[in-house]
């Protein structure tokens, strides 16, 4: 009956829906993996996709769609968004992608440790969902390859570990992190430029991400529009089957770079240990150097857009053009890998230090703070041996990072950046506070390993790199690691592939956890705005209302539970306080501006 | 990440040079000893100068060298560079005097042009003056420059002018064949510019005559090209390898031949690839497994079936697995997924896996408060030994810095036969898991004279659930607990002392670790009869590392066993009753954590307050919720019947126990609507 009604409605109503299509507006950072058989109980059925963004921010909204009969292929198109007073938010700044659910290891969504099982997990953000074919019967993924002559074939992405390593015969050559049989950055493997029609079978949930690029010149206000879902009838007519309402609120302020909780003017830096450099990209693209440079530039651009502002790729210090073209910059601390610090005779170490310093001066200015590192996870005894080397380089203005496990006190006299394997939350807050005290707030305290990169859950990633370390008083993320290859999740032995995103011809394919990472950085940016606005009013006894609001705002951050507070709720609370504080600030500035005029009148 | 890097000898030299400084004056004077011959004097001067420069006494170092340089020059043939001249240049480098150093380089170059040029390049690099390098590079002879930029120069990517020079050299008809090959191998191996490829073509056209003794570093050429998927280059290099007589063994190497065949196929010449494989399979002294590997490649590139290739092969199962493994890997490299999947099935059949393990968990109406209570129930419980080997490399676990895992070194007298026995039981408060080790030397373990068995426990409240990893030792119980996700409405992190605890107990004959998982952590995942939780116990035992379920690695959730619950509906209701009773009283008081607890405030009072809360939010979203849950709380009585317990549990406990998250969700929606519609 329902089906017949739908059909008749379509026949007689023209553009009306064909079949029943339901959508839910969901939190893009939900803890729930929206698998094909999941009905989004935590979403709003028929709701509006709400996107609330400040200027200079990328912000996603999300929705899930289900049809109660097989609709074949459907097209989704997002309209231009318009405000009631005629302002427009162009389609070109709206990016609509489908969330691809595919097979990952048995630990997907939860941890980065390897497991030989396979289960479905949402992860990839694609324009063409057929770029990866998922075979449920075989529990396998396949990459679609299209050759220049039009031939289409596949690469199996779930082979057992024994089959995986094309470098097995070649031990001693290449980098141990590169070896997948899948050469993923050649021209035969690329996503479409915009969202292609997707399959919408009966009773299958399909999630979409709609990301708004709110540039700094966007006018504040409320913009509304629609995502129209339509299908092609047998006689080639396009029939609308659903309309998903979209509302974008552009806030009247910009976001600065992320700063620290304990000092809202000290940068909160994010690096990654990474396996990305021109040589490794060439390992994945068939040895095309010119292409590798373009791909690296695209990667930098993607990373900057996702909140990784500081380049971490190998040789980044020697590629300022690529870095800056991509929108990244070196921030205050530049990992200078141009040459490496190593123990040698004093005379030779001075030569090397001077050489690197000259390079840094020439490339980044005499006020730059280049970083030189040595060693990995060493103990106190080892650190003691090369302490003189560290101090020598520090005389030339280098900063030294230390990640050893011995406890920060062993290296407190020399570590400018300390990043031990600790959890990025309140469990580390005490250690963080002591380190910050011991360095007068000038040091940089980061974390890694707990957990390593790999978890697909965007809410987890958001907290792990955002509010968790921020509120615990850390000043740096420095986790392990970024890869561009490793499309096979089930063939690892100890750790799953550590993928925030995946290499392809155009650079990288994004994932929901990479979106989560960006949201984490943006959470810190909002908190920075809040603190900068609130702190000046915190003891403003001449402005009781402003002071009260400032304290409520600061209390919000002080009392938020870094390991359990819903971060979208927290974000919206912060926005509410920011808007109130902005009014107080504007009033205070207006009052201050009027005061000289009053004095003149009095005179 | 990698293990801590061991300290180099140079690091100790740092300390040594400091100690030597005190004797510098003595040794500097000793250089003047007339009894020394030239060579010994030069050696002593070299040593002194190095140490003087360590101590930044550059003027003295310079003077020392200049004093004895003429003597060495007089004793050195005119076409050789005296070492003290090089040392003088080094002194100037150490003293940060580039111009003076380059002045010495001119003198070196006057004796040996190549030596001078190389030295000049090293010096300008050490001053970060790459702009000056070209001038010296142009002075290098052809024979010297390609090798310098190929090996010493760090030849992943020589500068463009060096590549241009190499191309010119290679395309010059006057250059010898071996010279051409050498120049290419050192500078252009992975360069894919058109001119470089033209050079490669030229090399392939070289006659074999003249290349009999030529070799090239195939480790830095042939192999990287394959790693990079540059198939045509691999093919070209192999053919070049064949031409060069000095590489005969390399060309015959079965791994290089296999790479060549794969590259041929991927470059589009499947026919040649198949023919090459057939020829390689018949090579003299080829191992049987390698021969089969080539036959597989030939069949796959021809599109022939591979199902029965090994039907008549006389291979034991281990060799069979090796052949299938290579064939599968090659199928993947060739992008032939159908073959790869077929081979994967055949490969998997070479291995056996033990069946899944399960352990019954029954309900005890008597509360299990301690190990002593468990001992009373012990005879009725199902038990299982951790007797399956741990299936991974323990050495590699050192890279896991997240887990506080300690695998103790053996002590004399350790009980090598001891193993862990697992049993489990639940009551109305918690799930209890017991790890018992029968050991007549238990007291020695208790007092530290022997290692006991340390355990690593994995636990998840069902399939596809976030899990915990716990580390325990016999003396302290669980000391390490890792949660995978953060708290949310359906995920509750375990904390030692809050929702989870452990205890240990020793007797003369055994030691026991008791793990207690409070039901409040899993109120929304309570098991019914037949449901299971996931579990494994890894035992780091002196006698060998074992597991209960047979995990093939740490955190290998697919390998874990099942704790299968045997629960009547009445027993489940008892559990629910306790949860209702423990949560109904102060459910609205969601306090802050530990020392950060500022004020115990009822959440609804707070939100209704106009100053610290949001009355509009309270009215719209919380008032009815509060009333409904308070009404349910009022129905909680000590004498509730089972039906009431179940009703209140279903309707109220999720709100009571998950209040923080329920409030967050309501607040999120409310604020979203306000911000969208009103912009505030």
Image (tube, rainbow, N blue to C red):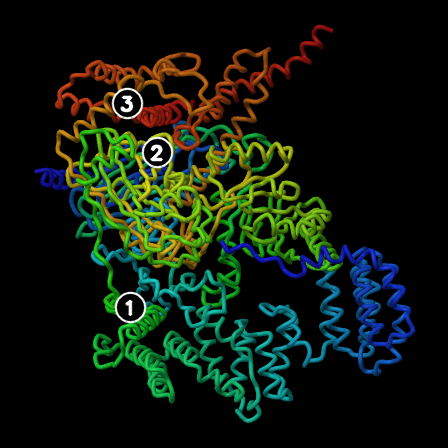
Q: Position of residue A91 (x, y in %)?
A: 39, 42
* Tag nearer the camera, 2 or 3: 2
Question: Please, is residue A356 above or below residue B146 in the view?
Answer: above
- Answer with the quarter of the image where residue B139 lies: bottom right
Pinpoint the chain carrying mark 3: B
SS for tag 2? strand
Q: Position of residue B130 (x, y in %)?
A: 71, 63
The quarter of the picture where residue A12 lies is top left
The circle on residue B656 is 3
**What kind of element bears circle 3?**
helix
Q: Which residue is mark 1?
A: B340
Looking at the image, how many numbered discs can be counted on the residues? 3
Q: Is residue A41 visible?
A: no
Q: Position of residue B430 (x, y in %)?
A: 26, 32
Crowding at mark 1 (Cα within 10 Å: few <14, some 14-19, many 20+): many
In the image, are marks 2 and 1 on the same chain?
yes
Residue situated in front as seen by the camera: B412 or A463 = B412
Locate residue B405 relative to residue B327 in the image: left or right: right
Assess whether mark 1 and mark 2 are in contact (beta carbons under 8 angstroms): no
What residue is pinned by disc 2? B501
Q: CA distance from mark 2 to mark 1?
A: 48 Å
Q: Earlier in the sequence, mark 2 or mark 3?
A: 2
Image quarter (top left, top right, bottom left or bottom right) of the C terminus of chain A: top right
Residue B282 position within the rendered picture, expressed as x and y whole percent measured from the top left? 34, 88
């Amino acid at each position: 009956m329902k089906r017949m009604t739908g059909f008749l409605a379509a026949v007689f109503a023209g553009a009306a829906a064909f079949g029943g299509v339901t959508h839910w507006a969901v939190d893009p950072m939900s803890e729930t993996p929206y698998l094909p058989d999941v009905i989004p109980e935590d979403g709003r059925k028929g709701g509006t996709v709400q996107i609330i963004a400040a200027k200079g921010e990328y912000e996603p909204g999300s929705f899930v769609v289900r049809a109660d009969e097989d609709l074949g292929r459907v097209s989704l198109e997002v309209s231009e968004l318009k405000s009631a007073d005629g302002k427009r938010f162009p389609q070109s700044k709206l990016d609509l992608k489908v969330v691809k659910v595919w097979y990952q290891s048995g630990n997907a969504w939860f941890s980065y440790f390897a497991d030989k099982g396979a289960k479905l997990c949402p992860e990839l953000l694609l324009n063409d969902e057929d770029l990866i074919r998922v075979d449920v019967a075989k529990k396998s993924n396949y990459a679609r390859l299209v050759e220049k002559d039009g031939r289409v074939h596949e690469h199996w992405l779930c082979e057992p570990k024994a089959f995986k390593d094309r470098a097995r015969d070649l031990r001693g050559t290449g980098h141990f992190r590169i070896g997948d049989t899948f050469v993923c950055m050649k021209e035969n493997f690329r996503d479409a430029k915009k969202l292609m029609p997707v399959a919408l079978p009966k009773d299958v949930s399909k999630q979409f991400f709609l990301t708004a690029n709110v540039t700094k010149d966007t006018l504040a206000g409320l913009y509304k529009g629609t995502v129209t879902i339509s299908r092609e009838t047998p006689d080639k007519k396009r029939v609308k089957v659903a309309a998903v309402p979209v509302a974008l609120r552009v806030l009247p302020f910009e976001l600065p770079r992320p700063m620290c909780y304990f000092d809202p003017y000290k940068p909160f830096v994010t690096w990654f240990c990474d396996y990305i450099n021109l040589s490794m990209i060439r390992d994945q693209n068939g040895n095309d150097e010119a292409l590798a440079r373009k791909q690296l530039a695209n990667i930098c651009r993607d990373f900057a857009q996702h909140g990784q502002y500081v380049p971490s790729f190998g040789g980044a210090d020697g590629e300022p053009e690529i870095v800056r073209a991509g929108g990244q910059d070196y921030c205050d601390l530049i990992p200078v890998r141009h040459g490496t610090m190593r123990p040698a005779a004093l005379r030779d170490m001075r030569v090397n230090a001077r050489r690197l310093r000259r390079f840094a001066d020439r490339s980044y200015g005499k006020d730059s703070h280049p970083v030189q590192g040595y060693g990995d996870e060493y103990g106190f005894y080892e650190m003691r041996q090369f302490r003189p080397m560290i101090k020598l380089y520090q005389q030339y203005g280098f900063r030294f990072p230390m990640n050893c496990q011995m406890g920060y006190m062993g290296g407190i006299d020399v570590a400018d950046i300390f990043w031990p394997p600790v959890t990025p939350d309140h469990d580390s807050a005490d250690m963080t506070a002591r380190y910050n005290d011991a360095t007068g707030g000038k040091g940089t305290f980061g974390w890694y390993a707990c957990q390593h990169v790999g978890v697909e859950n965007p809410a987890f990633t958001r907290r792990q790199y955002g509010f968790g370390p921020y509120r615990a008083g850390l000043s740096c993320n420095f986790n392990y690691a970024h890869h561009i290859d490793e499309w096979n999740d089930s063939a690892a032995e100890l750790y799953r592939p550590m993928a925030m995103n995946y290499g392809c011809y155009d650079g990288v394919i994004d994932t929901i956890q990479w979106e989560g990472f960006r949201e984490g950085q943006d959470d810190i940016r909002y908190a920075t705005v809040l603190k900068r606005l609130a702190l000046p009013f915190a003891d403003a006894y001449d402005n009781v209302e402003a002071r009260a609001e400032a304290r409520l705002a600061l209390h919000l951050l002080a009392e938020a539970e870094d390991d359990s507070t819903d971060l979208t709720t927290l974000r919206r609370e912060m926005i509410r306080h920011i808007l109130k504080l902005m009014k107080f600030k504007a009033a205070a500035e207006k009052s201050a501006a009027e005061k000289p005029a009053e004095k003149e009148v009095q005179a | 990440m990698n293990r801590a890097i061991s300290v180099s000898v140079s690091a100790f030299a740092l300390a040594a040079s400091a100690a030597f400084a005190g004797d510098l004056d003595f040794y500097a004077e000793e250089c003047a000893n007339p009894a020394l011959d030239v060579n010994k004097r030069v050696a002593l001067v070299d040593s002194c100068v190095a140490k003087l420069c360590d101590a930044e006494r550059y003027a003295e170092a310079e003077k020392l060298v200049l004093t004895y340089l003429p003597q060495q020059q007089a004793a050195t043939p005119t076409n050789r560079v005296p070492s003290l001249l090089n040392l003088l240049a080094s002194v100037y480098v150490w003293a940060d005097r580039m111009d003076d150093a380059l002045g010495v380089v001119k003198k070196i170059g006057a004796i040996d042009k190549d030596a001078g040029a190389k030295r000049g390049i090293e010096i300008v690099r050490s001053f970060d003056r790459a702009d000056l390098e070209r001038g010296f590079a142009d002075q290098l002879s052809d024979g010297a420059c390609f090798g310098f930029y190929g090996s010493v120069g760090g030849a992943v990517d020589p500068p463009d002018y060096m590549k241009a020079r190499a191309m010119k050299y290679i395309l010059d008809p006057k250059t010898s064949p071996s010279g051409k090959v050498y120049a290419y191998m050192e500078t252009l191996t992975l360069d894919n510019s058109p001119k470089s490829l033209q050079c490669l073509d030229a090399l392939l056209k070289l006659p074999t005559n003249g290349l009999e003794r030529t070799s090239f570093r195939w480790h830095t050429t042939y192999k990287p090209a394959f790693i990079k998927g540059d198939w045509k280059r691999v093919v070209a290099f192999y053919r070049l390898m064949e031409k060069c007589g000095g590489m005969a063994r390399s060309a015959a190497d079965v791994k290089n031949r296999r790479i060549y065949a794969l590259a041929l196929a991927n470059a589009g010449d499947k026919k040649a690839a198949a023919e090459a494989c057939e020829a390689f399979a018949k090579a003299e002294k080829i191992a049987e497994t390698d021969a089969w590997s080539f036959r597989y490649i030939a069949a796959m590139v021809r599109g022939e079936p591979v199902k029965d290739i090994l039907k008549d092969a006389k291979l034991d199962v281990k060799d069979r697995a090796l052949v299938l493994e290579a064939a599968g890997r090659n199928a993947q490299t060739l992008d032939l997924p159908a073959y790869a999947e077929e081979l994967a099935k055949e490969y998997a059949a070479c291995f056996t896996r033990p069946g899944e393990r399960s352990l019954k968990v029954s309900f005890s109406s008597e509360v299990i408060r301690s190990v002593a209570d468990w001992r009373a129930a012990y005879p009725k419980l199902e038990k299982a030994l951790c007797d399956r080997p741990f299936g991974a490399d323990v050495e590699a676990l050192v890279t896991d810095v997240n887990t506080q895992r300690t695998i103790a070194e053996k002590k004399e007298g350790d009980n090598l036969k001891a193993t862990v026995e697992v049993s489990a039981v639940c009551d109305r408060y918690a799930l209890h898991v017991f790890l018992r080790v029968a050991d007549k030397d238990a007291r020695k373990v208790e007092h530290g004279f022997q290692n006991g068995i340390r355990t690593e426990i994995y636990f998840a409240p069902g399939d596809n659930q976030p899990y915990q990893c716990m580390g325990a030792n016999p003396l302290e119980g669980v000391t390490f607990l890792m949660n995978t996700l953060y708290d949310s409405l359906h995920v509750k992190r375990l904390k030692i002392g809050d929702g989870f605890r452990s205890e240990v107990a020793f007797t003369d004959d055994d030691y026991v670790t008791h793990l207690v998982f409070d039901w409040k952590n899993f109120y929304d995942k309570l098991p019914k009869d037949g449901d299971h939780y996931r579990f494994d116990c890894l035992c780091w035992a002196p006698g060998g590392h074992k597991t209960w379920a047979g995990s093939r690695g740490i955190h290998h959730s697919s390998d874990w066993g099942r704790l299968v619950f045997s629960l009547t509906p009445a027993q489940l209701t008892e559990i629910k009753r306790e949860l209702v009773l423990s949560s109904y009283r102060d459910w609205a008081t969601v306090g802050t954590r530990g020392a950060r607890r500022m004020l115990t405030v009822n959440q609804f009072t707070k939100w209704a307050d106009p100053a610290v809360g949001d009355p509009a939010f309270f009215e719209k979203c919380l008032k009815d919720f509060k009333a409904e849950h308070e009404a349910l709380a009022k129905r909680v009585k000590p004498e509730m019947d089972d039906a009431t317990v179940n009703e209140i549990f279903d309707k109220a406990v999720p709100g009571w126990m998950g209040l923080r998250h329920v409030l967050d969700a309501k607040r999120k929606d409310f604020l979203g609507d306000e911000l969208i519609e009103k912009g505030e």
